[in-house]
Amino acid sequence: MTTPAPASSRRPLWARVPVISHLRQSIGLQRGMLIVGLVLTGLFLLTALLAPALAPYGFAQLRGPDGAFGATQPPSAEHLLGTTQGGYDVLSRLIWGSRTALLVIVVAVVASILIGVALGLISGYFGGWLDRVLVVIADAIYAFPSLLLAIVLAIVISGGQSSMWGGILAAALSITVIFIPQYLRVTRAEVIRIKSEAFVESARVVGASHARIMIRHVLRNSTRTLPLILTLNASEAILTLAGLGFLGFGIEPTAAAEWGYDLNKAVADVSSGVWWTAVFPGTAIVLVVLGLTLVGESLNDLSDPRLRKRAVGAEPVEDLLDPAHATQEASA
Amino acid sequence: MTTTSDAPAARAGAPRAWAKKPGGSLGRYLAVRALLIIPTVFILVTTVFVLMRLTGDPITAAQGGRLPADQLAERIHEAGYDRPILVQYLDYLGGVFTGDFGTTLSDRREVTEVIATFGAATLELAFYALIVAFLVGIPLGRLAAFHRDRWPDAIFRVGGILAYATPVFFAGLLLKLVFSVWLDVLPVAGRADTRTELTLSRGDGATGIYLIDAIRTGDPAVLGNVLQHAILPAVTLGLLTAGVFLRVVRTNVISTFGAGYVDAARSRGVSERRLLRKHAYRPALIPIVTVVGLQIALLLGGAVLTETTFEWKGLGFQLSQYLQARDFVAVQGIVVVLAVIVAVTNFIVDIIAALLDPRVRY
């Protein structure tokens, strides 16, 4: 089916782009939350992209022109956020760390969407024993504490020790496996709903192949909720990465900067009153997750007309559909 | 099928799809639900086994590079890791069903013994955390619902999101920094002072749950010491869960508040405060039961990180120790046991939910 010709009453294209249209619909507190989230997310993306230009030193740099940085130096003019026990510059590792986080998010989310949506489509469309098996497996994985699953997968993928790409892939794929059931579940539910619609039946009557019906008619109509899960999952990915890093599955400090690893090293510092090695990377995680969560929650509320808040009108009922909140232990 | 509109219901709904028969009996529901545990546990055990063996055997992982090749091969042979993978798998399954999860490589202890020794500490921590979560999450959720869309609600909601956005170990580090290092009012780490721990372990039939053991000594100093050590870890782990409770209570109170029977009561002249407390609040608490069940997985994952932060010597702390020692037999054992605990807890929670709410049936 072709997309209907744009009617003259339709809003201009730029106003129909997902996030912008949401922003235009929002009011009051909801708009404030969305804007704060977008700003935080934007800052995170910029930092990650411009890391080489922003960071004063390299993430594994131990000495500058004036000799070694020195271990656990408090914040000063040379080292705005101080140095770590290992003698790294905290600010530089903070900035480079955003790059690692972004890479993990991108790999994890892309892989889990591709696999999860494909499985959900097949499972929902064909049904039968394959559907049952997939659903039971997805449910078992879903009930599994996700951090533990991530640990097992990190062992499998990297044997626990990691180069930059090894570490990023290990973290990303562990997160992927946790997310696949969510995408599978959501897509499957939509597919089951849509495949009984009249237009699917008429396509079948016309003689369209399964592949064509699945992709053109069903898939295109069942991706409505994906952007919402995507933002929520991105924040979960960061928390899982940090949790893995904190447990010692981080990426080696010489391979890339990773916030969770830095926090792991900061546990001993805190007891002796050294606060800057813990507070800054931790705050970075909180701000990024906060930004992504605010965007995700706002989009979630705004996309559902029942939950959307209007200037005057009925009470919004926040929904709890997003499974991300039920399974955030990894995160945590 | 469940009719509650929250995540747990959506989650639990999927496996029941083929058993959907409206108006089934409670007994039938319980039976089907109990049978479903078997494939779940089976899949969990199999998944972990397959994944852990994909990379090779645990002895090479632990000793690789440190032992000469012939000695390594001999140890692998002794432990049976050179047998066909299917034989190993059946052997492992048999072990699991008879309660034998293997012996750790690094300190040569039975995994079951490790779990018995350290499980009590994790159980205690999870229990404290749930109390904190209830005490904080439920009243604040109710308050947020009562003041919905006004500033207290906004503050609580942002607070709830912050509680989610803060990694539990970072929250722990911050609390430690403020209360143990700067203010110096609470202990930095551990479950009790060394002397207190000695006193507790000397008692006859010590349960390993320090709270119970301390009460049994009858010494207020011992009890005080144990409680002092528990505050920060409990708050750290509890706040994580409290954020989820707050959301659920808020949402449910708001939706029950709009129900017809509340309108009816309002039209009879019942005060708003009483409407909230008596009419909207109580039915809103039922979904909490299911949410608590889901939180068990979250709590156990969070406990691993909290215990590592506070050197709380429980299963999670032990797990991270074994991870660092690359003792994958121990890791596999602990992970499987924790996963089974989660599956069984979910089962129990589903049963409680079915007993409480007659709409939850197959």
Image (cartoon, grey):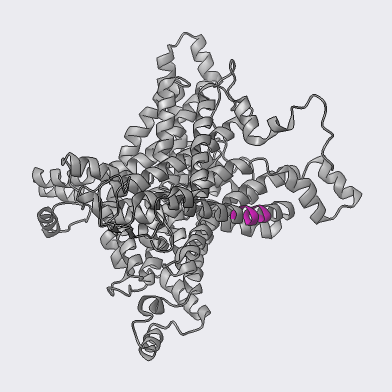
Q: Residue at x 44, y 70 (%)?
A: A159
Q: Residue at x 11, y 58 (%)?
A: B198
Residue that sits furthest to the right in the current view: A206
The quarter of the rendered structure image containing the N terminus of chain A is top right
Q: Magenta segment, principal secondary structure? A: helix
Q: Is residue B36 visible?
A: no
Which one is in front, A285 or B70? A285
Specify start and end residues of the magenta stretch as a single range.
Answer: A112-119
Residue that sits furthest to the bottom in the current view: B70
Q: Give the left or right position of residue A194, taking residue B10 as reference.
A: right
Q: Is residue A51 visible?
A: yes
Q: Give the left or right position of residue B16, taking residue B168 as reference.
A: right
- Does the stretch in magenta take in A114? yes
Question: Picture coordinates of residue A50 (x, y %)?
Answer: 51, 48
Question: Picture coordinates of residue A69 (x, y %)?
Answer: 29, 56
Where residue A286 sits, quadrant-wise, is top left
